[in-house]
Amino acid sequence: MSSFLLKTLTKKEEIDRIIRDTIDEVLVLRFGRCTDTVCLQHDDILAKSVTDVSKFAKVALVDVDSEDVQVYVKYFDITWFPSTVFFFNAHHMKLDSGTADHTKWVGAFHIKQDFIDVVEAIYRGAMKGKMIVQCPVPPERIPKYQLLYKDV
Amino acid sequence: MKEPSKKSEIEYCKVCRLHHDHGSRHKYFPRHKDLLSTFLDRFRTKIADVRFFLKNPSVLRPQEQSQNRVWCVFCDEDIVELGSSFACSKAINHFASSDHLKNVKQFLSKNGPAMDCIDDFRISEANVATWRRKCQSLGSEDASSFKGSCEQLSGTSNDIHNKLAFKTMDKIENVPAQLINSHHSSDVLPLQYNTNKYQISHSELPGVAHYGSYLNMDSSHLPLHTDPPSNLPGNGFGKHVIPSRSKDYPSSQDQERKQIKGSYSSPGEVGMTSISSSHSSDACGNVHSGAPPPWLDANDGNSSNVQLNQSDMSSSFQAKIPGNTRKLNPNRVGAAWAEKRKIEIEMEKRGQTMNSKVDAEWLPNFGRVWQSGTRKESRKEFEKEKRKLVKTESISTESEPVKIQPYISKRARRETGENGSG
């Protein structure tokens, strides 16, 4: 249901356009499927928070089942859904949440405030020129997962 | 990646409204100090309003009780004046209490500046004692005049309201004249104001300026509109109110006072007074016509006009971006790219055809998970992988499909060959 409120992108050109047109704002790209339950929970949190962060962030959803988007799925090394990637001025922002993968947020957020805090931390870091920021979410609310290296 | 020197628990700072893991260092950060000073100043204005009523106690009518409330930021509780006969009595008692003092000390030790400003946020016992004496004297005056008027009423009707009023009068010493509007002296006015943004014109009390900020800040209580003649629904006040849309409360008061002198309606009328339009000079214009505000002098106004007329592309573009109209940090991530992109967009808008078609192979700057070099290297690596993948796919499609046949042994082939030739 929240996919009606947030833009869903299915083509590489759309993703490119949104990355290039988002200037001086954090761009949040969620890679996932709108039918998956965890993605649904994640999308719900995003949809509720989008107005709160609208002054410094933009949120968009990317459907991973689309053919055109597979190049980004490979480029961003996305193996778990939902995965959220953050950009600022077309530069990728890394997030150190204590997990193995700093390039994205894997899984759903537990509460709205966590998402808002993460986006705010990224915005503050980006405004200071930092490309990697510390995650403000407490460890008990960070989803855990295993990363495989080349299917090992 | 650098590890922080001290990993502390994540805490929530009430002042900055932020989660942080700085621990006890957080209160020395300059940003926190700035926010703390504004935070404490806001509370100081609230307590100043309460101190006004400490010096000038006045009666509190029941219909105003629910709006006469204060949020104590140190104790995290809302002090509502339900059942109190004097304005801010519960607030005064709260600020003088030992629990409040304890909470203030705790807050200051956790967040803030030195303890020397602790007296700003509490009311001393001596002041409370003088306030109580004043209330008693005020109450006795009220009670004597109230009794006189009550005698008149008792003969006329056995209205249940009057019965209750007599009962409460017996119980409470200093009950004010709750039900008799005519008793209200013209000196005691402040409580009849309904929200922070509005003020009764004819009162010249010095403390009234602060009064509005003290009252319930939630303007949703009263849906006030800009149409002056319309009556407010649920407005139980006996005085009129002049609506004003301006958020800048102190400045608007002075303007209203100037304008209202000629347009005062009789007391006891519920409703609003219209400001005569002759006051607003058409030549100057107003906020809707885009005229400069009156606090800019004529000289300054000219210079500001000149600045506005300058068609500076970057400044006009920055103004369009929501929020940030000030100069952004040039060291922020992707600053150079952002500036270049802004210029491109501006030129596209102006109609100059740029190379707007984005290369299909364009990829954003991304640091991959398993890469060990710079981000450019990760992009090159990815493109190499993509080319390899494309090559292998093309090779597989170009080669002819191998026809699978069953295995025939040499002897069988020889025999068939001999049979064929023979």
Image: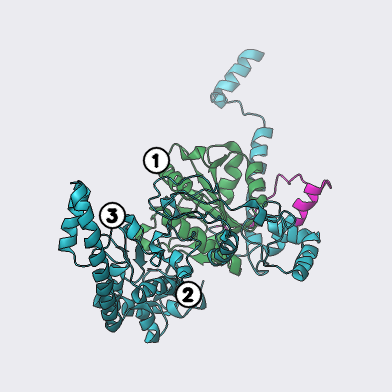
Chain colours: A green, B cyan
In the rendered image, the residue lying farthest to the right is B352
Label whose residue precedes the other's in the sequence (3 or 2): 2
- Residue at 30% of width from left, 72% of height from top? B92
Observer-side mark, 1 or 2, equals 2
Kind of residue indicated by mark 3: Leu
Q: Are marks 1 and 3 on the same chain?
A: no
| Disc sitting over residue A5 in the figure | none
Q: Which residue is mark 3?
A: B179
Q: Where is residue B227? Give x, y as percent.
A: 55, 46
Query: CA gap, disc 1 to disc 2?
Result: 40 Å
Instruction: Write down the chain letter for disc 2.
Output: B
Q: Is B344 situated above or below B207?
A: above
Q: Are marks 3 and 2 on the same chain?
A: yes
Query: CA gap, disc 3 to disc 2?
Result: 49 Å
Q: Secondary structure at mark 2?
A: helix
Q: Where is residue A31? Give x, y as percent.
A: 52, 46
Kind of residue indicated by mark 2: His
Q: Are marks 1 and 2 on the same chain?
A: no
Crowding at mark 2 (Cα within 10 Å: few <14, some 14-19, many 20+) = some
Q: Which residue is mark 1?
A: A37
Crowding at mark 3 (Cα within 10 Å: few <14, some 14-19, many 20+) = few
Is residue B422 among what the camera can see?
A: no
Image position of B174 (left or right of B29): left
- Residue at 22% of width from left, 57% of height from top? B150
- The dominant secondary structure in magenta is loop
Q: Give the magenta range.
A: B343-368
Q: Contact, CB < 8 Å: mark 1 with mark 2?
A: no
